Amino acid sequence: MKIGRRNLTTFIKRIFSRHNYRAILKFKDVHEQTFKSIYQEIFSSGEFPRKIKFKSPTGKFEIKIYSPQDFSTFNLIFCREDYYTPENFKIVVDIGSNIGSAAMYWLTRNTYNKVYCYEPSIINFKRLEKNLEIFKSRCFLHNEAISDYNGIGYLNLEKTGTYSSLNVIKKDHQYYDKEKVKVVSINDCLEKILKENNEIDILKIDNEGEELKTVSSINKNYWKYIRSISVDGDNVCEYIPSNFTSTIVGSAQRFYRP
């Protein structure tokens, strides 16, 4: 039995999560049509693709979404606030940018930060470009995958575009094709960004099955330049320096230097 796109077990777990209660309360601060948006989130309803309008600290904006998964991702980021965001942040590295929901979140927190986006899927990348066009002076888009090596990889394309993955094919997702992509090592990625900036305030890694390999290969010399890191998926605690504090919201493991 399913409720919306979720099976009954997942739905019940969501009901009893305190983070989700806080997210529901946050809907009124983000969505212009609060109750309609809550209904659409619960029952995975609404037409797709469509543009949704939202409120942020710097004004009113809109983003185009293409599936119920995109809408849920938007709400996890904007309403449940899965990703740790330190005060006065300036530099963000967004690995696994998808259609730009996380990047949009950070770009609308203030008017001076910069976001470096990495998204290997050409379909998602084109959607990312369109969604972030108004921020083109502050976001830098790369049609590349990030992992622990440099080379060529083959992206397993998932139907909605949310779960496309280099190496991990999950049985509960529908994969329909493969796409040849450029893969860049996390250390080369960080080196390039740190040459242009003194520090990385937010490092977000959601590269669908590559998280553990990516985090575990980060050169230890780079950690002192990273203020916070949010990772979806695998347990990466043992690879995070001991001076980082850990919190978890949903599937996002969050670490920051106090």
Image: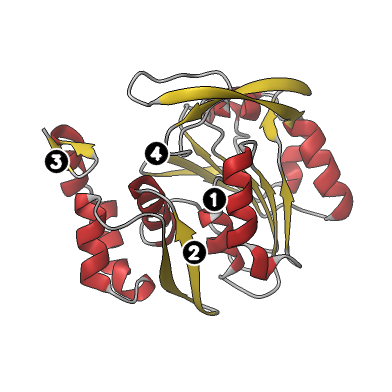
- Local packing at callout 1 (Cα closer than 10 Å; few below 14, some 14-19, many 20+) is many
Q: Tell us which disc is closer to us: 3 or 1.
A: 1
Secondary structure under tag 1 reads: loop
Looking at the image, is mark 2 or mark 1 earlier in the sequence?
A: 2
The answer for how far apart the CA atoms under marks 1 and 4 are is 19 Å
Foreground residue, 153 or 150? 153
Q: Tell us which disc is closer to us: 2 or 3.
A: 2
What amino acid is at disc 1?
Ile
Secondary structure under tag 4 reads: loop
**Residue, disc 2:** 63
**Residue, disc 3:** 12
Secondary structure under tag 2 reads: strand
Secondary structure under tag 3 reads: helix
The answer for how far apart the CA atoms under marks 2 and 1 are is 9 Å
**Residue, disc 1:** 99
Residue 258 is at least partly visible in this image: no
Residue 162 is at least partly visible in this image: yes
- Is 114 left or right of 31, judged from the image as shown? right
The answer for how far apart the CA atoms under marks 3 and 4 are is 16 Å
The answer for how far apart the CA atoms under marks 2 and 3 are is 29 Å
The image position of residue 87, as x and y in percent, is: 59, 66
- Local packing at callout 4 (Cα closer than 10 Å; few below 14, some 14-19, many 20+) is few
What amino acid is at disc 4?
Ser
At horizontal 32% and vertical 68% (from top left) the residue drawn is: 26
The image position of residue 237, as x and y in percent, is: 52, 30
Q: Tell us which disc is closer to us: 1 or 4.
A: 1
Foreground residue, 17 or 128? 128
Looking at the image, is mark 3 or mark 4 earlier in the sequence?
A: 3
Q: Is residue 204 above or below residue 165?
A: below
**Residue, disc 4:** 251
